[in-house]
């Protein structure tokens, strides 16, 4: 660590010309964080024109930065930019396959440890809507709650005492019977977990007008269109942050005035 500090402190701090080279077709997202690492004064102008833009292999974003900063921080900056851009591409594919102006695409809490803020930024930049960041954002009754408290009714009674007045209880539904029990209990937000499109269609037709109906559980890009069903308000996908396409970038540095 001491040797690395000596090396970094000995690098020239002169401005150099930087070329951020796109090596993949797709979308570029994460430039605010990339430039926060690199410390470029031109970042605001560049970000405004490029963030969220569709890009092609071979496109170049040029800027100036300290040689020491650019060289020592490029790998972390490029890694994050590539990761967020890959999420952007996958989010865009999900939205294109969903092809709905009335059904929201939600994420889940299945994010990479330590990167939830960044990953959700990429997801939202492309048009996705954030779900809960933490359990306490909105009380959601899941299978473990029902198992522990003795059933849906008992779990609802417990969480109703938590006084989360500004947001309604959410209930994860696993059976047809639970769906109708939730209606009787006055639940206004339910999530159908691991239901087939045919099952969702039947239950969605019985949904009260005051209820928000979310569908989740193993939904992929090639199956999401099957869940674009009338009365479904949202579809949540955990795989938007995994099994990502490759997005590749490189950073080349040159003395000012040379190519």
Image (spheres, grey):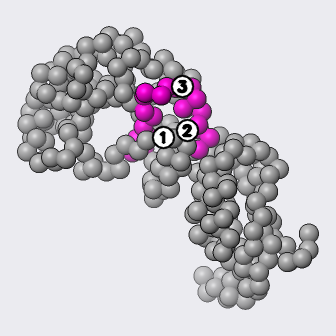
The total of numbered circles placed on residues is 3
Query: Alpha-carbon distance for marks 2 and 1?
Result: 7 Å
Find residue 185 and report its image quarter: top left
Question: Where are the magenta residues, as a range?
Answer: 88-110
Q: Earlier in the sequence, mark 2 or mark 1?
A: 2
Residue 212 located left or right of residue 120: left
Can see residue 81? no
In space, the residues marked 1 and 3 are separated at their CA atoms by 13 Å
Q: Residue at x 36, y 23 (%)?
A: 232
Residue 209, horizontal then vertical, whole percent: 24, 22
Q: Return the disc, 1 or 3, that comes first in the chain's sequence.
A: 3
Give SS at disc 1.
Answer: loop
Residue at image mark 3: 99
Graded by Cα atoms within 10 Å as few (under 14), some (14 to 19) or many (20 or more), the crowding at tag 2 reads many
Where in the figure is residue 224, as x and y percent of width and height? 50, 24
- Residue 254 in sight: yes
Question: Closer to us: mark 3 or mark 2?
Answer: 3
Q: Residue at x 34, y 20 (%)?
A: 231
Magenta span includes 104:
yes
Could you tell me which secondary element the residue under label 3 belongs to? loop
Circle 3 Cα neighbour tier, 10 Å, few/some/many (<14 / 14–19 / ≥20)? few
In the displayed structure, does residue 198 sit left or right of residue 17? Answer: left
Can you tell which mark lies on residue 252?
none
Q: Are marks 2 and 1 in contact (CB under 8 Å)?
A: yes
Q: Which residue is mark 2?
A: 91
Label 1 sits on residue: 128
Residue 149 in picture, x, y percent from top left? 11, 36
């Amino acid at each position: 660590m001491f040797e690395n500090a000596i090396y970094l402190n000995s690098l020239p701090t002169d401005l150099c010309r930087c070329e951020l080279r796109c090596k993949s077709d797709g979308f570029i997202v994460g430039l605010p964080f990339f430039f926060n690492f690199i410390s470029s004064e031109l970042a605001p102008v560049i970000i405004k024109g490029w963030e969220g833009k569709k890009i092609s292999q071979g496109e170049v974003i040029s800027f100036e930065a300290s040689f020491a900063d650019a060289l020592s921080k490029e790998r972390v900056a490029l890694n994050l930019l590539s990761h967020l851009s890959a999420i952007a591409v996958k989010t865009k594919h999900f939205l294109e396959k969903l092809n709905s102006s009335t059904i929201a695409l939600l994420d889940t809490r299945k994010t990479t440890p330590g990167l939830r803020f960044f990953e959700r930024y990429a997801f939202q930049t492309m048009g996705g809507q954030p779900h809960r960041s933490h359990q306490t954002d909105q009380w959601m009754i899941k299978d473990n709650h029902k198992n522990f408290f003795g059933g849906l009714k008992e779990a609802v009674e417990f969480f109703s005492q938590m006084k989360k007045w500004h947001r309604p209880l959410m209930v994860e539904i696993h059976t047809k019977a639970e769906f109708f029990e939730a209606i009787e209990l006055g639940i206004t937000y339910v999530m159908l977990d691991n239901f087939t499109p045919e099952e969702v269609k039947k239950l969605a037709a019985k949904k009260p007008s005051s209820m928000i109906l979310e569908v989740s559980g193993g939904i992929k890009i090639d199956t999401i269109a099957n869940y674009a069903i009338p009365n479904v308000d949202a579809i949540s996908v955990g795989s938007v942050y995994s099994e990502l396409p490759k997005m590749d970038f490189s950073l080349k540095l040159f003395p000012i005035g040379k190519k």
